[in-house]
Amino acid sequence: MLWPKIVLKPAPMSEEQLFDRAGIVAIVGRTNVGKSTLVNHLLEEKVSIVSDTVQTTRNVIRAILTEERGQLVFLDTPGVHKAEGDLGKNLNKAARSAIQGVDAILLVLDASSKPELEDDGWFRRITREEVPVVIALNKSDRNYDCSERYKAMWEEIKLDRESNKEVQWMNVSALQGTHMPDLLTSLFTLMPEGPALFPDDILTDYPRKLNIADVVREKFFHRLEQELPHALAIWVEEIHEGEKKWTVDISVMVERHSQKGIVIGEKGRLIKWVREQAEKELYEMYGVRFKLKLWVKVEKNWRKNFWILKKLGYA
């Protein structure tokens, strides 16, 4: 598991709130189908980082939506992909195990591209699950629509596995917000009645250090695209919380000395841009000024080092 188990204790609620609906929804699917974009849109807040790079989401992130109908706790999971090395295998394992003990599963598919092997795998897995399943056909606003191919695949797999599992299909666009209210209504309907799992003023229980690291990593992803991201890791060493400004010491890990120059950029321009953009976003998140100190370090083959993966929360 990428995430330590947390015992969720119901938050104190008033009598009239006791019969609201509350539950946990695992958001799963292959990589780059728009799971994190969907979570951010449903909450109308940025909780998960977003990019077109595989392995952008590396931890299971709990995002909490509380409103008059009740509370939904979303588990935004890493995208399942063809794994190479320990990091990829651990991310896949975390995503698959996230559906254990939840109240509903939200499987997100990319309706603008044809089904892939990972989609087949998720279909086969959910035929065995007893909890309700909603399948969101994301990116349905694009010209190329493969929705019927996904539905045909689902029916073939049900027949093959002799399953009578029923699912709810929904066409959505996480980027445009299309049918997001309908999706929320469906998910609330599936939740059990009961008190909230978290106090109503909490948006996520994601640790501050991991959140800051994710924001910095996202900025590198936006500039580096496919050039380096899988060999890049961010670790927050220490946070010094001043009254008016927080100073954060951050290690930027790469696997080879030749990659240091790529991360730093010509005359330090890239790492400066990353620092400035991250400081701006963190200020908007926390309401306090940030000073980020980024130190680039070479950790040879860190993706195969169990202890580094464990420190980063990836093992």
Image (spheres, grey):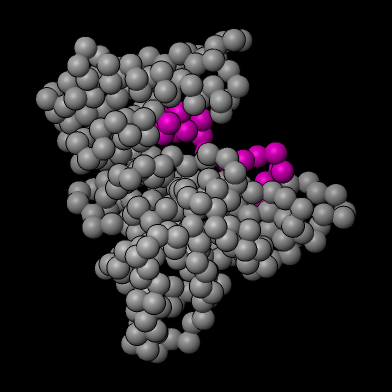
Q: Is residue 275 above or below residue 230?
A: above
The image quadrant that residue 17 belongs to is bottom right
On the picture, is 223 further left or further right than 108? left
Q: Magenta span covers which residues? A: 196-215
Q: Residue at x 44, y 77 (%)?
A: 128
Res 219 → quadrant: top left
* Side of 64 relative to 19 (left or right): left
- Principal SS element in the magenta part? loop
x and y, in percent, of residue 132 in the image: 56, 72
Where residue 52 appears, as percent x and y from the top left, is 33, 45
Q: Is residue 94 visible?
A: no
> 265 and 305: which one is in front?
265
> For this rendering, which residue is in front, 262 or 5?
262
Quadrant position of residue 245: top right
Q: Is residue 65 visible?
A: yes
Residue 179 placement (x, y as % from top left): 57, 61
Rendered position, 244 above or below 48: above
Residue 181 vs 45, above or below: the answer is below
- Using residue 85 as the reference point, say whether residue 287 is left or right of it: right
Residue lying at 49% horizontally and 57% vertically, measured from the top left: 173
Residue at the far front: name it: 143
* Image coordinates for residue 44, horizontal then vertical, percent: 60, 44
Locate residue 312 relative to residue 284 in the image: left or right.
left
Q: How many marks?
A: 0
Residue at (38%, 56%) from the top-left corner? 33
Q: Is residue 259 magenta?
A: no
Q: Residue furthest right?
A: 15
Query: Is residue 202 within the magenta segment?
Result: yes
Q: Quadrant of the C terminus?
A: top left
